[in-house]
Image (cartoon, rainbow, N blue to C red):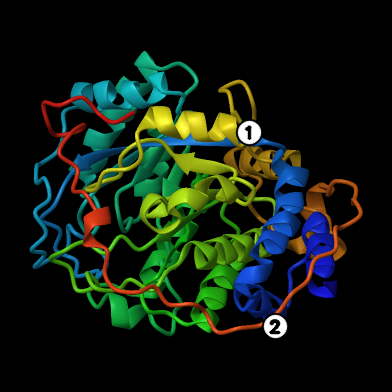
Amino acid sequence: MELLKTLVDKGLRRELPTREEALAVLATADDDVLDVVAAAGRVRRAWFGRRVKLNYLVNLKSGLCPEDCSYCSQRLGSRAGILKYTWLKPEEAAAAAGAGVAGGAKRVCLVASGRGPTDRDVERVSRTIEAIKEENEGVEVCACLGLLSDGQATRLREAGADAYNHNLNTSEATYGDITTTHTYADRVSTVQQAQAAGMSACSGLIAGMGETDEDLVDVVFALREMDPDSVPVNFLIPIEGTPLAQEWTLTPQRCLRILAMVRFVCPDVEVRLAGGREIHLRSLQPLALHLANSIFLGDYLTTEGQAGADDLAMIADAGFEVEGSDTTTLPAHRADALAAARAGCGSHSRSEGEATGGGCGPCGDAAPAEAPAAEAGVGAVEPAQAAGARTDLVAVRRRGAGTDLPPNA
């Protein structure tokens, strides 16, 4: 009871919880999950109201990746029966993006498999960004191309990229168990390059890969320290033909606790409900909207998602509204700090003012007024385990980008 009140108060002040408090959220009993959702929901609404931002993925190049990330169906040695194709042409990518925008997506995420882009790839993606923005006024474009080399982030920003995504995925301590072809430090460096270039940083995690509660808290605290503007929370999609195909340890309640912990640790960032929500949250997806203020519309990179029309109905039925292109997603202090970074004011971090609940200390950002917190009970139990693999829940994508079939948007 006292824990949730404390966490709400800290969330409204943008004050970092203790590790013990974050771990306690993950250990909450299933009987108390609704109390946890209600408490974290207060923090979400304080910063983002009842708005839900829609994002749409376009897989520019699918499969045949030289990296060995254990969770990925596009990895080196993958036996997953996914679509494989080389770079989409700019006009093809723009057409794919247009389907998502027509469905209400405010941001288009351009993703390409591979370790990282060559300079020629950056030029190709730059032309694609230009084509998308010419056809879709006001749309945000986020690039996700892997590890960046010197100068590439600046070139993408100059081409019109608004954001760059590169997830940390898991804790530094366990990263080598998931991937061996690059390091955790490589990922941190790429996020920092994107921030230095004035792009909005997007970095998140994948839950359900066999990690401990301590690993989850470690990666979320590391994300808080890096200070991205958006944090995608993915739940592992165990795809046949990958090393983690049998890793089914998540329950809907466990997913809600993870999302709540992320919201308490990162109260004023865009928390995005990402891959795996349909197969792990299932009928409890609407509850997750009280924790996350952003979702992907339709399909993912190599797997099918919920139909776009069903996403829109879920948002409306849960009492939320789709965020329009004329609305700024981020709270004012974050939006102002991002604008300052793009204008060259990047010599200090927003975290400098967090101890007192402010934003960027030198720029004088301020947090919203506090509201009284609701009380709720908390109990501690071991995380529940899912019973057996559910391969029937995972469908490989056969439509949209790279196919002749219309997308699921």
User: Which quadrant is home to the C terminus?
Assistant: top left
The disc labelled 1 sits on which kind of residue?
Answer: Phe
Would residue 243 appear left or right of 281 to someone viewing this image?
left
Residue 72 image point, x, y percent: 24, 62
Which image quadrant for residue 142?
A: top left
Residue 337 image point, x, y percent: 68, 44
Would you place residue 62 above or below residue 239 in this image? above
Tell me if residue 162 can be seen.
yes
**Disc 2 + disc 1, Cβ < 8 Å:** no
Say which residue label 1 marks.
320
Would you place residue 170 above or below residue 39 in this image? below
Query: Which of pointers 2 and 1 lies earlier in the amino acid sequence?
Result: 2
Relative depth, front residue between 42 and 314: 314
Would residue 357 appear left or right of 165 to someone viewing this image?
right
Residue positioned 16% across, 64% down in the render: 240
Say which residue label 2 marks.
20
Which image quadrant for residue 331?
A: top right
Tell me if residue 160 can be seen.
no
Residue 405 image point, x, y percent: 15, 26
Which image quadrant for residue 308?
A: top left
The disc labelled 2 sits on which kind of residue?
Answer: Glu
